[in-house]
Image (spheres, grey):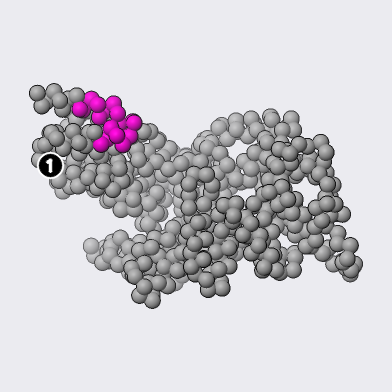
Amino acid sequence: MLALVQALLHYTFAALSGHTPASMTVGYRHWAGIGTKQSCKDALPWYKAAADSAIRAFNAGPPGGRHLPPHKIRLTDHDGGAYGPGASSSRSSLVTGGSNAQTQHEWDDLVEFHLFHADKGDPEYMYRLGRLYYQGFGAGGLGSSGGGGGGGSDGLWDGGRDFHRASKWFLRLAKKVWPSDGRDATTDPKARPGRLGEPPRVGYYDAAKDRRSDRVDEHAAMVGGLAAGYLGRMYLRGEGVAVNYAKAFLWLQRGMKQGDREASNALGIMYRDGLGVERDLKKAVHLFVAAAQQDLADAQVNLAKYHFGVGDFASATTYFEAAIRFDGKRWADGFQAYYYLAELAARSTAAGGGDTCPVAVSFYKRVAERGDWDHEVWWEAERAREKGDRRTALLGYWLMAERGYEAAQNNVAWILDRDKQRIRVPLLDAVPASPSPAVKQLDRLALTYWTRSAAQDNVDALVKMGDYYFSGLGTEDGVPQLERAAGCYQSASTTRFSAMSMWNLGYMHETGQGVPQDFHLAKRHYDAAYDTSSDAALPATLSLIGLYARAL
């Protein structure tokens, strides 16, 4: 305990000097009660400081903010979850970039397939190829890529984005729809000629003078409009091309005319911030509303920020909450929206308006962990893992786990886990040999991080805790703690609807281990597992047959 207190003291000094990872560590330790009493209010200022740093880094990027680092993927997710596909409840999606490719070979095959069709002039595949390059391969890295190298040269840091190739394909497609340079459409006949050397005036667009090609159908024009929207944003942000507000304005107008909501939002940013055009907040809000009505999360955030800025917190909250809604049909903006919702919750906490501190801390924590551009440790751990260097990978994940990252805590526990058995036959499972003291210490450490991961709503980690207590792994003297195991399974089954934990509870009631022997409760839990997941149908059915046979 003394070591934990001393560690917290050193982390606090580092956090006070402005070290953001230390602020996250101190915040997490106060939040989880590690080396100090558990206190949400003590964690709040540290997580706010880390979130403030993240939002500053975001706003320091190009118009619209920096691209967020890829999501961090748990090692268990690569194997279908801690208990494998079907049996796991906490598996995250591996589709975090433009594709679900997990190796360099898969990525190359995907690009080659799109390239084959795009070279034939298929508008759909030209657009998809550009988007693949723009969004990159995401968080999965690309194992066996052979890249390596420090400083993110292998593309892990930015998800493997290639803006230059993306702009090439978007422009090639858009030119099929709009072959002219658009000069006539953007030249205001009423404007006075500018002085020599002045940049051309931006802000005028006459769609009637910007004729589309007669050779493209409506579908190709629609897809071309999406490409035009991407091009406009790339010229606005300087991605793969030099910043050019005039070209950004032209392509965004073309995209908006074809119904692209992203183009409407980007035009709103130009008018809001006066980027190449005269600042016009009223016009910007009108454009944000148009895009928000098409359910674009970024536009909902921009509209919410406007209401936040004028003090209309009720409307701001409505739009921020709409932006973080995720229904599987769109990308939710969980960064800026969570930050401002945390700000509102923190203000309510300071004013004594209810217990909103947990909401504020939770949201600040999300923002700080999502916007960690300057924290290279995770990606160094990923590179080490791909090279087979488990020790370096473990060290990196461990450092991130101390900062409160649930995915890192889960990774540490998974690497140290000795109980990766997928198929369990209780009567036939061999009794493990007595482990050495060093192995027992690693088991205790694994249980600690399964516990911390479970505390952050990872249901598979909670079931793992139950398995450890049931088997005596990581417990004092290696003695099973069946009552605690049953408690973990009960929590996982009633609050997280885990079919695995329901089956486990059924078995414990059937055999009377840690709970009173009760065939009726055993049947109830087996039935619940059967009803909760189709993947549990076979084991639940076999267990019910065995239960009926035992009851005869």
Residue 86 location (% of width, % of height): 36, 33
At label 1, counting other C-alpha atoms closer than 10 Å, the crowd grade (few under 14, some 14-19, many 20 or more) is: some
State the SS at label 1: loop
Q: Viewed as shown, does residue 223 lie left or right of 477?
A: right
353 relative to 263, above or below: below
Does the image show residue 437?
Answer: no
User: In this picture, is 371 found above or below 75?
Assistant: below
Q: Which of 211 and 390 is in front in this view?
A: 211
What is the x, y in percent for residue 73? 44, 45
- The residue that label 1 is drawn on is 515
Tell me where the magenta segment starts and ends, as one range. 528-544
Task: Kindly indicate the quadrant of the structure image that contains residue 200.
Answer: bottom right
Principal secondary structure, stretch drawn in magenta: helix
- At horizontal 80% and vertical 53% (from top left) the residue drawn is 207
Indicate left or right for 430 with 68 as reference.
left
Please determine whether, in this image, residue 4 is positioned above or below residue 462.
Answer: below
* Horizontal and vertical percent position of residue 196: 90, 67
What amino acid type should be assigned to the residue bearing mark 1?
Val
Residue 299 in sight in this render: yes
The residue lying at 18 percent from left, 41 percent from top is 470
At 10% from the left and 37% from the top, the residue drawn is 517
Q: In this view, does 81 lie to the left or right of 500?
A: right
Q: Does the magenta stretch include residue 132?
A: no
The image position of residue 113, as x and y in percent, is 64, 30
Residue extending farthest to the bottom is 351
> Who's the residue at 51% across and 66% down the image?
315
